[in-house]
Image (cartoon, helix red, strand yellow):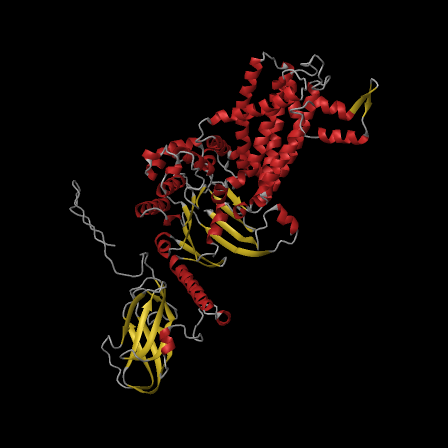
Amino acid sequence: MAPAVEIVGVSKRFRLFNEKFTSLKERLIHFGKIPYEDFWALRDIDIVVQPGETVGLLGHNGSGKSTLLKCVAGILQPTLGEIRIRGRMAALLELGAGFHPDLSGRENVFLNASLLGVSRREVQRKFDDIVAFAELEPHIDQQVKYYSSGMYVRLGFAVAVNMEPDVLLIDEVLAVGDELFQRKCIDRIRLFQREGRTIVFVTHSVDQVRQICDRAVVLDRGEMVACDAPGPAIRTYREHLLQRQEYAEAQRLGLTEAVEGEEAADQGAPQADERVNVFSQEAKRNLQVRIVSVKFDYPECGERPYVVSGEPLAINIAYQASRPITDLVVGVAVYDMEGRLLFGWNTETMGVSLGVVNGAGEISFNIASLPLLDGTYPVTIGIHSRDEGTVYDWREQRDSFEVMSRSRSAGVLELQVEVKVRREEPGAEEPGAEGVA
Amino acid sequence: MRGCAAAARPGDAPLMTISGPSGDTTSDREERPQPPVRVVSARVSLAQRLRNIWLFRECLIGLTRKELKVKYKNSVLGFLWSFLNPATSLLVFYVVFQLVLRNGIPFFAIYLISGILVWNLFSVAVPQATVSIVANAPIVKKVAFPREILSFAAVLAALVHFFLQLIVLLVFLVIFKRQPAYAYLPLLIPALLALLMLSLALGVLLAAVNVKLRDVQHLVEIGLQVWFWATPIVYQYRLVRDNVISKVVAGKVVPASGFKHAAFIAWRLNPVTPIVLTFQRAIYGQTSPVGTDGKVVHVLPDHAGQWWYLWQLLAVIGFSFVLLAVALRVFGRLEGNFAEDL
């Protein structure tokens, strides 16, 4: 079957003028030498979307994902390359775009639909559906300027969605509206999927990608860095996010050069060993005991650099003590990408006494079954005295491990869940059908 | 996309080239045929552009209705304003030219209104079209459709007002018990066509340029002021022709100097003039009537027949057609940046 959307070698250049030289006078004064910078918002993007597929575009702010969607929608023209779309397309770039405040809801429905290229006759046929979906029956003949923002958005979504597009483009519009309406939108999108329509949508929410998408494309600074199943794509996305966070952190501290050098040396996952102490605990360390290495051991994974949800994980910490120490405590804390502490233990709270420590050694924390969904999880390792007064060594979120998940559940935790259904329907032959998922 | 077309007429959707009839669609939904392919790229051919505009004709009508509705929304007098505006200028010009300057033209009100009618359409359509893209920035930035139709809608809205003002003219004709020159009435159709084409061409061209250079909308206002006085609306055509191209010396008509002749030709190249002349000839109907002061006033060319007017109108239509083609080209070039520049 022919692909629904073909994006072939698309690049988009923006000319950024240093000042706004939009008046004729300025043009004449600066004739021919208006300073500008070329900014490539997209570089050489190739994506093929098959009919019935749902593809998510992931990326941080400014990665070009919205630009790409606008190009697909035909609002921006790509500087290079071509986009081919088969079938009717509706773009939800901004709900209620093109509504005129002075016109009534009814008039706006017709105007908006005509902008989407839908005939008046077709709108008339679907008008009741649209109004019902938007839940605006009593207000449809009021001027739109008296609508609340929620009503506005509902009407916009209702119009676009009821036009039965073959290809639906959505740009983060699912984030608006109240929870009930959001759920309604998601339900509608699922219905679209069942009907075999193609959906391309832009989002920040990895949860939505995991829930809805068949495939995800990750953009970073205008380049496509992943085009894969949601799990691996989300992993790539988080990797790039982490890189950017480190970069931003370093830039804040005036260490840009160091990190840039690092990035050049190790593009994949920059090791931040050489950075100056950033965190207070790290600043306090006296290095009488050093953390020599932190290794994540994925016993069942072989060569894979990640662990699959539910598999065991071992965190091995090798240390080197320069003198005998009696009150040593080793701790581990696991965070998520947003910096929330997920769990933490140390040898003290676990009731393990290390006795007198001298010379080299290794301490392992073994997790029998890792209950996390996919993502990158930074880990903090600390070696300190029992009263926490002395910090021997501290590595604040410098190490991380990767988790991949096969499940489509949302959130952070991977739990084993069983579903049971018990029916007591009048007239049903069997007394109660049970289904276990 | 653009489904009205997709559902009803296969492959008739805008911005699309039709894909081969491979018939590989699973048509479980209605009788939907092979979906058309829409191509987004930096270049769209002129024929394609015109096709897209045609496919969005319903949208064009919708936008025109919007323009009309929004213009007088929340105003008490509403559409009455579109009568009051020309009526006021009519009154002012009547007082100044007839009563103060004593130009002696009989039934001057009818002469005036037949020209002002034309001018109002032109002078409303062009500036409105010029700002159409900028004024509709929210739509342009968020919805994909052939943007030319915004300019087209502005011209069409002005056309609707034109027809309303035509009622005023008819009322005047009845009041003064005047008859139009029936032999020249059919010429109003090519005249109106020429006027629309010219307004569209200028509107589309200026709208596209105005997105980047906002000065254009102000320039247009000034330009239209000059243009108004360069068109024989409040004064008569013969006044300029007889006095600039030639003069009467000792009872003989002597051609004017070369420079004056060139100036006349430049003035005569004004594409609105033939349209105004046609309206005046058809509606006012007289060429050299006896004036209010008993003397003969030369208003319009004496020996010019229908063909004289028709040729000029065809020239304007031809010129406007070329200009429109150029305008659409320029528009297409600049269109890609609209969403960024707004």
Where's residue A352, x and y in %? 24, 79
Residue A168, image quadrant: top left
Residue B271 visible? The answer is no
Residue A67 position within the rendered picture, expressed as x and y whole percent measured from the top left: 49, 51
Say which of A143 and B12 sits in front. A143
* In front of the other: B292 or A100: B292
Q: Nearer the viewer, residue B186 or A45?
A: B186
Q: Is residue A344 visible?
A: yes
The quadrant holding residue A143 is: top left
Please give left or right for residue A246 compared with residue A77 in the image.
left
Q: Position of residue A216 (x, y in %)?
A: 42, 55
Would you say B201 lies left or right of B269 here?
left
* In the image: residue B74, left or right of residue A323: right
Furthest-bottom residue in this view: A323
The structure residue drawn at horizontal position 25% and vertical position 60%, both measured from the top left corner, is A416
Q: Vertically, is A2 above or below A294?
A: above
Is A58 above or below relative to A178? below
**Is residue A258 depicted above or below A166 in this figure?**
below
Is residue A235 depicted above or below A294 in this figure? above
Where residue A260 sits: x, y (%)? 50, 69
Total marks drawn?
Answer: 0
